[in-house]
Image (tube, rainbow, N blue to C red):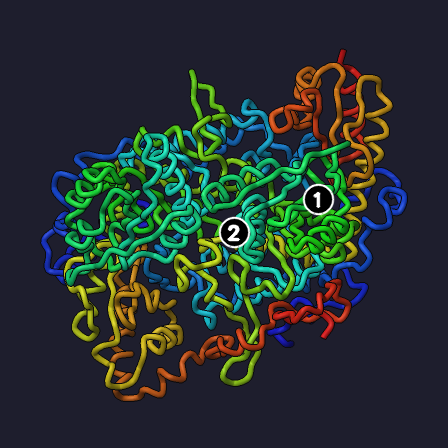
Amino acid sequence: MNKDLSIFERSRPGRRGYEPPRPPFPARDPASLFPASSLRRTPPALPEVSELDLVRHYVLLSKKNTSIADSFYPLGSCTMKYNPVANEVAAAMPGFAWLHPFQDDAEAQGFLVVLHRLERWLASLTGLPAVTLHPAAGAQGELTALLVARARHEDRGEGKRRTVLIPDSAHGTNPASVAMAGMTPLAVKSGPDGLVDVADLRAKVGAETALLMITNPNTLGLFEERILEIAEVLHRAGAFLYMDGANFNAIVGVTRPGDFGVDLMHMNLHKTMSTPHGGGGPGAGPIAVREEFAPHLPVPRVLEHAGRYSLEWDAPKSIGMLRGFLGNSGVLLRAYAYLRRYGGDGVRSIAEHAVLNANYLRARLRGDWHVPYDRTCMHEFVATNRRIKETGIRTLDVAKRLIDLGHHPPTIYFPLIVPEALMIEPTETESKETLDAFAEDMLRIAREARENPQLLRDAPVTTPVRRLDEVKAVREPRLRHPCPNSAVVSSGLGSAASAGGR
Amino acid sequence: MPFLPHTPEDRRSMLAAIGVGNLDDLFASVPAQARLRGAPDLPPGLPEPEVLRELRDLAGRNLPVLDRPCFLGGGMYRHAIPAAVDALQGRLEFVTAYTPYQPEASQGTLQAFFEFQTMIAELTGMEVANASMYDGASAFAEACLMAASVTGRPRVLVSRGVHPHARAALRTATAHAGLEVEELPLAGGRTPLPRTIPADAACLALQSPNFLGAVEEIAPFCDAARGAGALGVVSVNPIALGLLASPGECGADIAVGEGQPLGVPPNYGGPSFGFFAARGEFVRRMPGRIVGETVDRDGKRGTVLTFQTREQHIRREKATSNICTNNALMALRGAIYLAFLGPRGLAEVASACATTAHVASERIFSIPGYAPLLEGPFFHEFAVRCARGADRVRAALAAAGIAGGIPLARFYPEFPDALLFAFTETNTEKEVDLLLGTLRSVR
């Protein structure tokens, strides 16, 4: 049996699996309901498969994935920690999953309790009193915070502040979000210690500065030790300090951003709060802000009055909505369940063990791998290929070899300020044995680079496919499976994509 | 502590290997005055059974729409979800993977997205589709931003029939992008073609069926847009496309929509997913992840993330969008759902929705005190004017245990007495009868 077929290649005309509910009324002829111009002329060329075809196809696909459920996944800045299965069970409860967003608040009191408590808990963890759960993911949280900060500046007659300072080690979403907010990014240098160069910051802060977007701990896994001074520089200049909370896992329960001068921050609940990444989402990117920003937060707001919960949709100074409905409620529910497990007495242990694991792995690797900022790190650290550079082996080869040895590779070629970077974030849920096994495989790779480099250049060989030609994917784009009965009307205008029927 | 594997001996030997005395020493770089003294203000931790018990209690304080008469729509609908969708999407190999940055280790996710893109292209009749957006509203906003970027023009003409949340997301997204949003008014619940289209129009954007339920004439809008050098942006309900003309057949340039009807529970507003499709020539201007097929070193077929130079992790502030994490797992549900239904199943579901809605509309409008707001065709949802007042009707429906309809007044002050009702293949004759009886009973 060919296990590599596409679902379209499994399809046979006339085969079917699913039968919808029997209609309660005799079917109306579409031609009697709609004008001819509104009717579909060609049916979509969707697959026609049996239920077993379907099950087998997606089970086979699932086996072609690497996931936390089967492998160590130290993807830096992504916080691939264990995703508790009980949280999936909770989110699937019909009382939550089958709640419609247009139901009256009175019919959703249980969900609103969850959302209201989660807001309070995130406020407690960040030290920032006002929280919105609206943003769908971290990048949308960034954009939300930028728009809120901009609204606040405008509200106090400082609307001319349009420059956003961003350290050169920042995630790409930061400058992209700044552009979407109609503001201008300006890079701040990192010093030789990997931290924000405060002299460069001072030189760049001015009357046009709206805010600084700082990732703390930063993408090198280092805590910005001069954060209090940085906050003061910004506040003195009338600007705000925004924190990208992608790395909040390192400090949750240990320190609160509101206590080190942060005015606004976002969190990625799919990182710190363990909601699953799902192959790229859904996430949730709540933001927490100081009270003065609260009027500008997106709608709806979750309100509580005398034990009754409601959604407030009218807020005159709000920036509005960034997405439909209130938020990724099902993701927020999982985060609630996660925090409920640890509780106020336990959250600190998350950060402690994330940092313990990262430092342990750093200690295990530092002899054989170049660690450019080799000191106590937070949740992650960066290594490079420098000590094996003479072999010609690149970081990409190391990553691919790790796949053959049963690990998902770390984040590679990021942060951009470190050439050939391997950004390693083990997370707190990995055991010492797992870290030891990874460390031993990394040492083995360093040896193989010298003794048998071809092994690395050929990797991976244990995967369903070997290294893929990404250049061909761009030069000869095939962005869909060709279907002989395609319903796609080709524009015939020099299409860059492979249309159906070819 | 839950989920932490460390034994006391592990901790001791790991600290020794690092060369520090205790866990606190690891946080020496955190300024002392910023360190938290004491525990944050959260209730104490609980074991799993107690957390689940609490959540069952809280779930019990909600009134879900699964097993009672439901006529709620407004962008999210109660459709039957085949058991296979939950079982297959729920596989932890899908649930606990990340964005497929390492293609050799992520062929499952990548192939599923590649097939998803194909299904969305087929459904919308468009040449290319991306691997999903957050939801329908943000997909709509991004479509209008893309139209402005493609045409280099600042004015977005958007029908007032577009979902109010999508228009709200558009307003937020364009607030500081140097763009003007101009709303096209409705007449009889649908959008008349504007007499003139300004020369600086980036796009004409409309939704069909629109928020009031009306099926719009898409093709003339797309023709008019093209004639004016603008793009035609169309938001569609994917189930309706089992019966109704696709955006591609109508000449659209960009097609988007809310994916929730395709096998995703309403989830109290999210997560669901958005879909985004366009004509092939625009592929390099699209937001979001795109998967392409290529070959490996041995010539074997495989899939990768492609056209990544559009994206924020490479292009930074010049990216087409800031999107990074999307709603991939929900899009996987959509793919499984569409693959299971096939063209015939989708047409049957669409037909059942339309038939029940039309039977119900005839019966509702034969009751004195209820009048149609729409003129012309609708799919499975329509607005009803209630002579006795929307609030009284809603109170009666709630008392009868019926979910719906949605009061339009909040979004359309011009329709203070109107309620929106949606019908799907899940509505039984008994449910429809209860609705009719309750409407009749309102005095």
Which residue is label 1 attached to? Answer: B196
Position in image of residue A502 (x %, y %): 72, 75
Q: Residue at x 65, y 69 (%)?
A: A495
Q: Is residue B183 visible?
A: yes
Chain bearing mark 2? B
**Is residue A226 left or right of B391 when viewed as pictured?**
left
What amino acid is found at the position of numbered circle 1 in the picture?
Thr
What amino acid is found at the position of numbered circle 2 in the picture?
Asn
User: Which label was assigned to residue A237?
Assistant: none
N-term mark: 2 or 1: 1
Which residue is label 2 attached to? Answer: B327
Position in image of residue B155 (x %, y %): 58, 46
Quadrant, the N terminus of chain A: bottom right
Rate crowding at label 2 as few (under 14), some (14 to 19) or many (20 or more) other CA atoms within 10 Å: many
Position in image of residue B406 (x %, y %): 66, 28
Disc 2 from disc 1: Cα separation? 38 Å
Q: Residue at x 54, y 46 (%)?
A: B138
